[in-house]
Image (cartoon, helix red, strand yellow):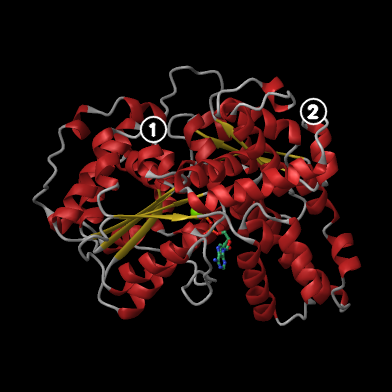
């Protein structure tokens, strides 16, 4: 048996009487290898050993907690599926550390904080470039989601700047002022979509190598390279691409060694005139916890914010997606969704997809009633999403006033303004009526709430810093 925990033969001694299981496993392994590629397979999946089958559950063993967590998060669902296809009685896959309770078992995460001397001393310009095998190289080359293109990205006020920057980079990578391109914004607003779109466009134009990976993957790749003593290859691969895109950079906060590695890669690429695209949930200056020099460099090119969606953009997105699906969704329903699901595009899309699937399945037209019925749980969750109390608490904290001042009669600007913001957010983020909101703010009249809402909207138009503050609050409350 070639697949196993290196030094714990006992872990699969029970296999003697289950040859069939072992054969199934070998078939699963070969499928997995085909799906994930040789390198990925070798790095993570050859470490798995078969454990016992118990009823509808099979246990798979991994030598360390780190490996178990990684395999679980990346391949857990797929492993369950494959097992179920092979042995229909197996419905669940349990992943366990082979030697539970052994505190000496090394974990790769430790490497993150204590790199081996070999890595620390690795020269940054390795001379032996011939060692990169094509299969290793293909491993970092972008695997792009073909649905995420510029054509399928709906442009509106909140994202038009980011979109324009992304297009520009795709058309003319490494142009002055656009390198790096730093895209930031809340969850589900299209950062990943835009990055894939850049990649797709570049590849279509041909003759460029593009690498795209999440910061998380970057870290695991880096750790895997340290484990397999192939950091040189890893560095070389990264530094040989024309365009490097790293998604969700905030993940690197607190991961100092990976950050350091990224910083060097970043510099090497930019110095060589290659393009970098990075996304994060905050602007470079707000990414506290990133090393200063990296933060500074990230902010040196073009920084583009994707704002929370507006009602108009949500409608446009829904229209585009409904049209693409071929199912007729009445305008009334689209408006209802755009009104109810304001958090982000991912959730909006999820809700629409569910409606469409339902319509296709039952062949019934989409109506408002059917929508409310089919999306019952989503809509309920959204109604419950933010409470006025939470809004008051967050706003009071942010502007440093007492919570009781949300309902007090004090009219000093320092108190009144945050209170107005809280009323504005209550109107935006909850489905409460104006009188209901007024009651929660010390029994104020609904006209006071109305005034607060329009006043805040007006101020946001005039004062960009204030608008950003309010927008930030909204994001915090919605996340
Ligand atoms: P992020 O990376 O910012 O969290 P994603 O790029 O993953 O968000 O977007 C979430 C989902 O919403 C994706 O399916 C994406 O295609 C879709 N989406 C986001 N913004 C738009 C847009 N402007 N037009 C069309 N689809 C969008
Ligand atoms: Mg993303």
Query: Nearest the camera: 476 or 139?
Result: 476
Work out whether 100 lies above or below 311.
above
Q: Compared to 403, does 221 lie above or below?
A: below
Evaluate whether residue 143 shows in this view. no
Residue at figure coordinates x 74%, y 47% from the top left: 450
Which residue is at 24% across, 55% downward? Answer: 237
Instruction: State the image coordinates of residue 473 (x, y, percent, origin top left).
Output: 58, 39
Image quadrant for the C terminus? top right
Q: Position of residue 375 (x, y in %)?
A: 82, 58
Q: Secondary structure at mark 1?
A: loop
Report which residue position mark 2 lands on.
442
Residue placed at 39% from the left, 42% from the top?
Answer: 220
Helix, strand or loop status at disc 2:
loop
CA separation in Å, label 1 and label 2: 37 Å
Q: Residues within 10 Å of mark 1 (few under 14, many from 20)?
A: some
Which label's residue is closer to the chain start, 1 or 2?
1
Q: Which mark is residue 288?
A: 1
Q: In the figure, residue 430 lies in which quadrant?
A: top right
**Residue nearer the viewer, 268 or 81:** 268
Residue 109 in view (yes/no): yes
Q: Is residue 222 left or right of residue 231?
A: right
């Amino acid at each position: 048996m070639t697949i196993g925990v290196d030094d714990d033969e006992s872990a699969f001694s029970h296999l003697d009487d289950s040859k069939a299981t072992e054969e199934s496993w070998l078939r699963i392994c070969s499928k997995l290898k085909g799906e994930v590629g040789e390198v990925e397979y070798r790095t993570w999946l050859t470490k798995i050993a078969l454990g016992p089958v118990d009823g509808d559950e099979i246990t798979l063993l991994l030598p360390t907690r780190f490996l178990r967590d990684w395999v679980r998060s990346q391949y857990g669902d797929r492993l369950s599926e494959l097992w179920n296809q092979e042995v229909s009685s197996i419905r669940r896959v349990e992943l366990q550390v082979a030697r539970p309770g052994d505190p000496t078992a090394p974990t790769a995460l430790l490497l993150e904080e204590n790199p081996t001397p070999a890595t620390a001393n690795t020269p940054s310009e390795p001379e032996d470039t011939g060692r990169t095998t094509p299969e290793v190289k293909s491993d970092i080359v972008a695997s792009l989601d073909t649905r995420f293109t510029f054509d399928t990205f709906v442009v509106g006020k909140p994202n038009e700047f980011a979109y324009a920057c992304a297009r520009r980079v795709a058309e003319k990578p490494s142009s002055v002022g656009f390198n790096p391109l730093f895209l930031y914004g809340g969850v589900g607003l299209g950062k990943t979509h835009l990055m894939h779109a850049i990649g797709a466009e570049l590849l279509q134009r041909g003759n460029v190598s593009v690498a795209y990976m999440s910061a998380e993957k970057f870290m695991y790749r880096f750790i895997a390279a340290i484990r397999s003593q192939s950091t040189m290859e890893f560095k070389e691969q990264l530094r040989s691409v024309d365009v490097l895109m790293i998604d969700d950079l905030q993940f690197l906060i607190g991961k100092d060694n990976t950050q350091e590695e990224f910083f060097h890669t970043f510099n090497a690429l930019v110095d060589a005139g290659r393009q970098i695209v990075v996304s994060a949930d905050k602007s470079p200056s707000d990414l506290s916890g990133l090393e200063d020099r990296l933060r500074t460099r990230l902010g040196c090119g073009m920084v583009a914010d994707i704002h929370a969606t507006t009602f108009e953009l949500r409608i446009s997105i829904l229209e585009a997606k409904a049209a693409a699906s071929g199912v007729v969704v009445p305008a009334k329903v689209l408006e209802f969704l755009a009104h109810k699901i304001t958090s982000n595009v991912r959730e909006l899309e999820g809700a629409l997809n569910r409606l469409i699937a339902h319509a296709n399945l039952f062949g019934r037209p989409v109506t408002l009633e059917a929508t409310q019925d089919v999306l019952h749980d989503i809509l309920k969750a959204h109604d419950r999403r933010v409470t006025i109390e939470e809004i008051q608490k967050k706003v009071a904290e942010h502007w440093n006033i007492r919570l009781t001042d949300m309902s007090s009669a004090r009219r000093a600007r320092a108190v009144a303004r945050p209170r107005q913001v809280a009323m504005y957010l209550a109107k935006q983020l909850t489905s409460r009526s104006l009188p209901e909101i007024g009651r929660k703010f010390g029994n104020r009249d609904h006209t006071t709430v109305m005034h607060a809402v329009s006043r805040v909207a007006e101020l946001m138009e005039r004062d960009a810093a204030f608008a950003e503050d309010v927008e930030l609050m909204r994001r915090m409350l919605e996340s």
